[in-house]
């Protein structure tokens, strides 16, 4: 009868069990007799070697689990790639590395990220002659689709025969002496390996080669990482498609109307939100300006936003001189045709020659007017968002900007991305507008850049770090400067 086999733990083979015919050292032997079967021997007492080995496995598995959990908490492709490189460097004892993704056509674009390597360093590595789609450091990986996820080591690049001289030159220039590369192949439904997504390579400053234990852990980690990366590649591609659709539904360019100059800044959130803006010339030299947003995110919100914006344009052409009528018609249309959506909107009818602006809002933030000696919010009438009242109507407000003054229209996403409470966010925006340098107050482009840079100093992601970054809202800032 064969001895039982201990189960594998997370891909790590346990040591073979001791022979069942070995007696315990302190147990007295009992002779067998024809009428009494030989007793089963007691299992041997664990020895120090086995205990040390088991302790090592437990430590490795704990480390591996912690690293995989950290990876799975990433929600963007860039964050996941950087986490992969950091974890691989820890498992393999390397200092630097790079990962390159080349997803299949139609599912994303090639991406290369480095750890401890700048753009110039990555450019030098890409000049190494290679045969496949990857850099030369990754050419000699196991064939794709075979399920072989073992890595490839170059323990001594300077002394290795058969390497291209350019490879040695780049290694000497960047100061690495050895490398270890691992393919990134997600499993297809957990049964067979899927197409190769890319590969990662880690670099050593001195000639070195990772031990078998380190290789095994890195292989297990990269197998899990590949599946997570494949999901993020698809998600990133879908988000980019929605963002492109969003941009195509917005004005391709701003109109030129005498007496007023415009600038706009628009940033789509990762989830593809429904915020929008519009600027359209109207009869008799007038101009219609609008900012609004649909609740929710994703392709459905973007499509509803496109329908709402198109409807507002039609109403603005017919009765734009009465912003209340425009929004009233929009409210009725939304209730009848889009009952599942709620929306906010602000519409302004501008007569640049007369320097007169008539504004009406439905649940949207009031515009901000800035000029010499003032930066204040326009007091618009309060109203619930479109689609939330049986009958919407609120009085409009008339503004008379002085020559050289500017109106700022914006989405509430600009306020939410600050991470502050709304009252503090409004104050932050007002201070940013008031701090526009005097030399820039006649340039709407400069005003838009200064306000965004001051309100969102981290490039538009202030207050949206970590898991909240995935839910960052759209930002719209429309600037109208009166000459």
Image: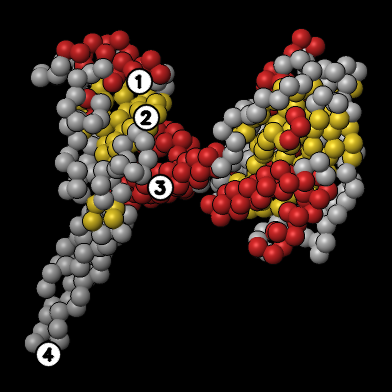
Q: Which residue is mark 1?
A: 122
Whether residues under marks 4 and 2 lie with C-beta atoms below 8 angstroms apart, the answer is no
The reply, left or right, for residue 115 in relation to residue 384 is: left
Q: Residue at x 75, y 60 (%)?
A: 332
Q: From the image, which quarter does the N terminus lie in?
A: bottom left
* Extreme residue toward the bottom, this view: 35
User: How far, Cα to Cα, is label 3 from label 1?
Assistant: 25 Å
Q: CA distance from mark 4 to mark 2?
A: 74 Å
Q: Nearer the viewer, mark 3 or mark 1?
A: 3
Q: Which residue is label 4 attached to?
A: 35
Q: Secondary structure at mark 3?
A: helix
Q: Nearer the viewer, mark 4 or mark 2?
A: 2
Q: Label 4 near label 1: C-beta < 8 Å?
A: no
Element type at marker 4? loop
Q: Is residue 202 left or right of residue 164?
A: right
Q: Separation of disc 1 and disc 2 at Cα?
A: 8 Å
Labelled pair 1, 2 in contact (Cβ < 8 Å): yes
First in sequence: mark 3 vs mark 2? 2
Can you identify the residue that label 3 sits on?
A: 234
Q: Do the numbered discs 3 and 2 sit on residues whose CB atoms are within 8 Å?
A: no
Give residue 112's mark: 2
Pointer 2 local density, CA inside 10 Å: few below 14, some 14–19, many at least 20: some
Choose between 332 and 136: the one closer to the eye. Answer: 332
């Amino acid at each position: 009868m064969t001895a039982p086999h201990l189960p594998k733990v997370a891909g790590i083979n346990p040591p073979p069990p001791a022979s069942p015919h070995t007696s315990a050292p302190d147990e007295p032997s009992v002779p067998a007799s024809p009428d009494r079967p030989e007793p089963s021997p007691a299992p041997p007492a664990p020895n120090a070697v086995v205990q040390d080995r088991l302790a090592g496995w437990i430590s490795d598995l704990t480390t591996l689990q912690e690293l995989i959990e950290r990876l799975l908490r990433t929600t963007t492709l860039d964050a996941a790639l950087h986490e992969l490189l950091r974890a691989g460097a820890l498992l393999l004892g390397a200092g630097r590395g790079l990962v390159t993704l080349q997803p299949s056509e139609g599912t994303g674009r090639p991406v290369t990220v480095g750890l401890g390597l700048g753009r110039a360093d990555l450019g030098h590595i890409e000049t190494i002659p290679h045969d496949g789609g990857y850099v030369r450091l990754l050419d000699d990986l196991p064939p794709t689709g075979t399920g072989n996820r073992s890595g490839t080591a170059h323990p001594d690049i300077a002394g290795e025969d058969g390497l291209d001289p350019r490879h040695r030159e780049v290694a000497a220039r960047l100061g690495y002496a050895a490398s270890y590369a691992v393919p990134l192949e997600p499993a297809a439904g957990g049964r067979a390996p899927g197409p190769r997504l890319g590969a990662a390579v880690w670099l050593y400053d001195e000639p070195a080669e990772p031990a078998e234990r380190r290789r095994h852990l890195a292989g297990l980690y990269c197998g899990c990482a590949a599946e997570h990366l494949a999901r993020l590649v698809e998600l990133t591609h879908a988000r980019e498609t929605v963002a492109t659709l969003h941009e195509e539904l917005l004005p391709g360019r701003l109109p030129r109307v005498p007496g007023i100059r415009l600038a706009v800044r628009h940033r789509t959130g990762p989830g593809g939100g429904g915020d929008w803006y519009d600027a359209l010339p109207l009869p008799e030299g007038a101009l219609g300006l609008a900012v609004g947003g649909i609740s929710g995110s994703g392709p459905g919100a973007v499509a509803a936003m496109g329908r709402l914006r198109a409807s507002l344009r039609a109403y603005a052409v017919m009765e734009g001189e009465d912003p209340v009528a425009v929004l009233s018609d929009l409210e009725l249309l939304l209730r009848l045709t889009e009952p599942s959506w709620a929306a906010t909107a602000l519409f302004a009818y501008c007569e640049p020659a007369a320097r007169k602006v008539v504004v009406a809002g439905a649940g949207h933030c009031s515009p901000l007017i800035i000029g010499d000696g003032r930066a204040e919010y326009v007091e618009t009438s309060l109203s619930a968002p479109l689609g939330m009242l049986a009958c919407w109507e609120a009085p409009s407000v008339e503004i008379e900007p002085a020559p050289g003054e500017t109106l700022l229209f914006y989405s509430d996403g600009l306020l939410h991305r600050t991470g502050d409470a709304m009252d503090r966010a409004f104050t932050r925006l007002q201070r940013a507008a008031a701090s526009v340098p005097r030399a820039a107050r006649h340039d709407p482009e400069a005003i838009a850049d200064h306000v965004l840079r001051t309100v969102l100093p981290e490039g538009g992601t202030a207050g949206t770090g970590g898991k909240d970054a995935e839910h960052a809202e759209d930002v719209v800032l429309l600037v109208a400067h009166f000459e």
